[in-house]
């Protein structure tokens, strides 16, 4: 591989039939280390430094077959524990609740059901549901900041909070202290939400995962290591539909 002027290169390699995945996306870039990851939506990706030969990459990959099988098995186990919501239901704060038709009336969210106008096309009903879930999520996020600010009173609060649907990230923090959170968090319990908010909040001071970052995160959330595992266990939610109308399945 010629390095002059090259910033990155990528290939998709088929994997042998006895592997737990069909293919791997190999990306050469100006990085220092090799990193293999599996994401349920994006598949298997292997990132390697420029200059590493294809033969070296294949040798590394062969050594990681068992690790990859474990990751995929873990995802399948998690998916069985946290399956997609059945038609006519949604996950709200980690609990499965029914979505009930309430014609020509403002939406109402209770602990046992979501009452909302479902008339019109299914995508219209989904937009109404998502708008209500976003409002509920924003209120929950602000409550986490309020509850934990006393643990780190000198840590700046976010300059702006936005919520959007993301494929693989739970949240992000920018240099201007604005934060973005995944809409999927609306479906998960308070423990998941608290971890993601505190994790991004710690990035206000440390835009890395250094020891200083983890000290800041520990000050905000002493249970963060166990909470992180709890969030990973709910990663199948990233692939779940928001809502499927009854009769559409």
Image: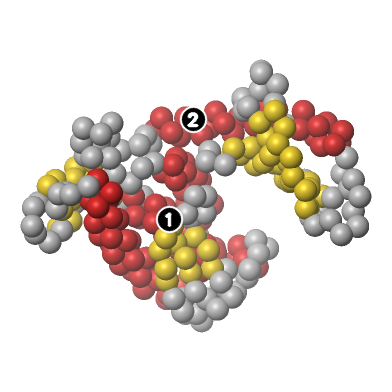
Q: Nearer the viewer, mark 2 or mark 1?
A: 1
- The quadrant in which residue 149 appears is bottom left
Residue 84 locus on image (x, y percent): 35, 37
Image side of residue 246 versus residue 146, left or right? left
The residue that disc 1 covers is 165
| Front-most of residues 66 and 22 | 22
Residue sitting at 44 percent across and 76 percent down?
160
Tell me the quarter of the image containing the C terminus. top left
Residue sitting at 39 percent across and 41 percent down?
240
Image side of residue 5 versus residue 174, left or right? right
Local SS, label 2: helix
Residue 142 locus on image (x, y percent): 35, 70
- The quadrant in which residue 78 appears is top left
Disc sitting over residue 133 in the figure: none
| Front-most of residues 82 and 88 | 88
Residue 33 visible in the picture: no
Mark 1 neighbour density, 10 Å: few (under 14) some (14–19) many (20 or more): some
Residue 72 visible in the picture: yes
Residue sitting at 87 percent across and 59 percent down?
5
Tag 1 or tag 2, which sits nearer the N-term?
2
The CA span between labels 2 and 1 is 23 Å
Local SS, label 1: loop
Residue sitting at 82 percent across and 37 percent down?
57
Image position of 161 with respect to 241: above or below: below
Image position of 138 with respect to 246: above or below: below
The residue that disc 2 covers is 76
Mark 2 neighbour density, 10 Å: few (under 14) some (14–19) many (20 or more): some
Tell me the quarter of the image containing the N terminus. top right
Image position of 82 with respect to 4: above or below: above
């Amino acid at each position: 591989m010629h390095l002059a002027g090259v910033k990155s290169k990528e290939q998709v390699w088929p994997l042998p039939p006895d592997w737990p995945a069909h293919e791997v996306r190999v990306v050469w870039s100006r990085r220092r280390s090799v990193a293999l990851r599996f994401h349920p939506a994006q598949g298997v990706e292997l990132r390697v430094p420029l200059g590493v030969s294809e033969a070296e990459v294949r040798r590394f990959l062969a050594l990681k077959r068992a690790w990859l099988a474990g990751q995929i098995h873990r995802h399948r186990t998690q998916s069985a524990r946290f399956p997609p919501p059945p038609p006519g239901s949604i996950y709200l704060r980690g609990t499965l609740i029914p979505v009930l038709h309430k014609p020509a009336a403002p939406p109402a969210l209770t602990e046992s059901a979501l009452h909302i106008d479902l008339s019109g096309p299914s995508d219209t009903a989904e937009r109404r549901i998502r708008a209500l879930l976003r409002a509920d999520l924003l209120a929950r996020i602000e409550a986490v900041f309020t509850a934990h600010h006393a643990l780190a009173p000198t840590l700046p609060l976010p300059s702006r909070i936005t919520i959007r649907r993301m494929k693989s990230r739970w949240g992000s923090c920018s240099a201007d202290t604005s934060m973005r959170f995944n809409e999927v968090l609306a479906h998960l319990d308070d423990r998941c939400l608290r971890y993601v908010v505190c994790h991004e909040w710690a990035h206000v001071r440390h835009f890395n995962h250094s020891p200083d970052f983890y000290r800041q995160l520990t000050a905000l959330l002493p249970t963060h290591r166990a909470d992180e595992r709890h969030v990973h266990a709910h990663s199948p939610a990233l692939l779940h539909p928001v809502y499927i109308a009854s009769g559409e399945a």
